Image (spheres, coloured by chain):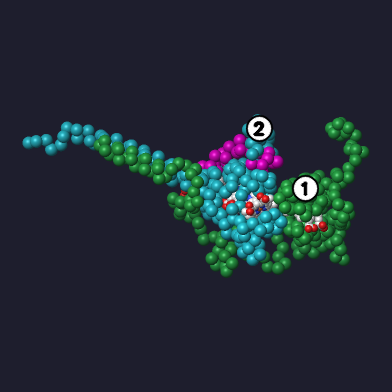
């Protein structure tokens, strides 16, 4: 009787198990790399109806974020500006520009400019802008260098881990009140003022929620 | 077995060449891997709505609506009966001089005014209030200077009215500044005007050295 199986096949079960490990590892690595917010969201830069440029308005002209996002330090929601806000200047600055036709039409008719939302927390997450901004967390921590972006791009993952990394140890992320809206400013810790940060945390009784009900309420 | 490994390696290369690396720019909305309850049947601020004819969930205010919780004392001004605080007018309807008595004109109030002024007025009127803000060189050529005699002598109530309703080429700022904020900004405008008129004799003796006098 000839051999049905070659001698090599003796090691086949072992090789199969080995391969399954390699395959499992590769698939896990691919899923963690490709199916998490760091890949899925970061870099999202939708085409907006008006080519509005933060690097010109916030960077070059030096407008404060609150000139347009005027409720960010007063309410949980960071509003987008009304078209009147744009027309404050654009009545006289580039009044005929074709790039601003949508804004002018919106100002006259009262219909909103259909901006595309970039950052979108899931509806089961409770988020509040004012509490972060008023407690020394700058826009740059969660939105990146908006003042250098021509098109707003999703810069951070905004995943649950991202939120918790700061909530567990906020001291190293806090900035001085006058630096909050200047996105180039460094944190108190980077300025070597860790003692100030610690005092601020103590005085303002900063204790970000880490329990599930803090953010999923 | 070797071919299986080759095929796997090929698949890895294929995935990377299609998927690319993290942080790649994309104009497509992010894929939601587990969309479970991500988007629920509720409205968030400034959201769209298919229900209303104009397509927005935020409804315009009916005439005469007063915002909650933005007044100094909770009740007496509820219907904005206070002509001075909310319109800058006297009871007879003229522009009022000076500041409403319920506001405490202290350092905190001034600093608040300075902060709001820097955000909302300085881009056009400039940090010094001389009308030389950054936008001047881009076309906002009609911006007024606060150091004109006319504006220096103007009743505070008239400036309040300019902020609330706008004037000629200046748009209203009532949506961005609450009535209390507007008074704080006016206080700071008055401070800028006073500073422009300042003389060496105004500097307190113990601060003269700071200025090298």
Q: For this rendering, which residue is in front, A74 or B171?
A: B171
Chain at numbered mark 2: A
Query: What's the magenta region?
Result: A160-183
Chain at numbered mark 1: B
Secondary structure under badge 2? Answer: loop
According to the picture, the residue beneath numbered tag 1 turns out to be: B132
Q: Position of residue B121 (x, y in %)?
A: 75, 51
Q: Quadrant of residue A30?
A: top left
Quarter of the image that includes the N terminus of chain A? top left
Determine the residue positioned at 51% across, 58% down: B40
Labelled disc at residue A105 = none
Chain for colour green: B
Q: Is residue A170 magenta?
A: yes
Residue A120 appears left or right of A36: right
Whether labels 2 and 1 belong to a single chain: the reply is: no
Secondary structure under badge 1? Answer: loop
Determine the residue positioned at 30% across, 40% down: B7
According to the picture, the residue beneath numbered tag 2 turns out to be: A191
Query: Chain A is which colour?
Result: cyan
Q: Position of residue A3 (x, y in %)?
A: 11, 35
Q: Quadrant of residue A146?
A: top right
């Amino acid at each position: 009787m000839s051999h049905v199986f070659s001698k090599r096949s003796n090691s086949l079960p072992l090789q199969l198990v080995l391969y399954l490990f390699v395959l499992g590892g590769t698939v896990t690595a691919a899923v963690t790399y490709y199916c998490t917010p760091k890949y899925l969201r970061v870099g999202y830069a939708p085409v907006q109806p008006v080519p509005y440029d933060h690097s010109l308005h916030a960077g070059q002209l030096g407008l404060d974020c609150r000139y347009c996002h005027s409720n960010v330090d007063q309410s949980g929601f960071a509003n987008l500006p009304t078209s009147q806000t744009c027309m404050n200047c654009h009545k006289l600055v580039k009044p005929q520009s074709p790039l601003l036709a949508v804004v002018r039409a919106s100002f006259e008719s009262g219909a909103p400019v259909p901006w595309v939302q970039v950052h979108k927390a899931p509806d089961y997450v409770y988020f509040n802008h004012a509490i972060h901004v008023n407690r020394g967390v700058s826009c740059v921590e969660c939105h990146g260098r908006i003042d250098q972006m021509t098109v707003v791009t999703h810069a951070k993952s905004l995943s649950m881990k991202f939120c918790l990394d700061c909530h567990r140890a906020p001291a190293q992320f806090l900035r001085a009140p006058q630096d909050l809206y200047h996105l180039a400013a460094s944190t108190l810790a980077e300025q070597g003022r860790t003692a100030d940060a610690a005092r601020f945390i103590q005085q303002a009784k900063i204790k970000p929620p880490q329990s599930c009900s803090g953010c999923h309420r | 077995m070797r071919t299986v490994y080759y095929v796997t390696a090929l698949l890895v290369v294929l995935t990377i060449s299609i998927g690319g690396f993290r942080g790649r720019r994309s104009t497509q909305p992010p894929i939601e891997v587990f969309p479970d309850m991500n988007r629920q049947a509720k409205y968030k601020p400034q959201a769209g709505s298919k229900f209303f004819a104009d397509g927005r969930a935020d409804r315009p205010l009916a005439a005469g609506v007063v915002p909650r919780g933005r007044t100094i004392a909770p009740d007496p001004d509820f219907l904005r009966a206070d002509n001075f605080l909310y319109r800058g007018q006297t009871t007879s309807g003229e522009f009022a001089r000076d500041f409403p008595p319920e506001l405490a004109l202290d350092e905190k109030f001034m600093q608040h005014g300075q902060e709001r002024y820097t955000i909302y007025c300085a881009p056009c009127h400039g940090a010094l209030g001389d009308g030389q803000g950054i936008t001047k060189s881009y076309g906002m050529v009609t911006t007024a200077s606060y150091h004109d005699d006319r504006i220096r002598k103007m009743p505070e109530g008239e400036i309040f009215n300019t902020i609330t309703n706008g004037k000629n080429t200046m748009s209203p700022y009532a949506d961005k500044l609450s009535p209390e904020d507007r008074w704080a900004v006016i206080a700071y405008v008055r401070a800028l005007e006073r500073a422009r008129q300042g003389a060496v004799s105004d500097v307190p003796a113990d601060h003269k050295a700071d200025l090298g006098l």
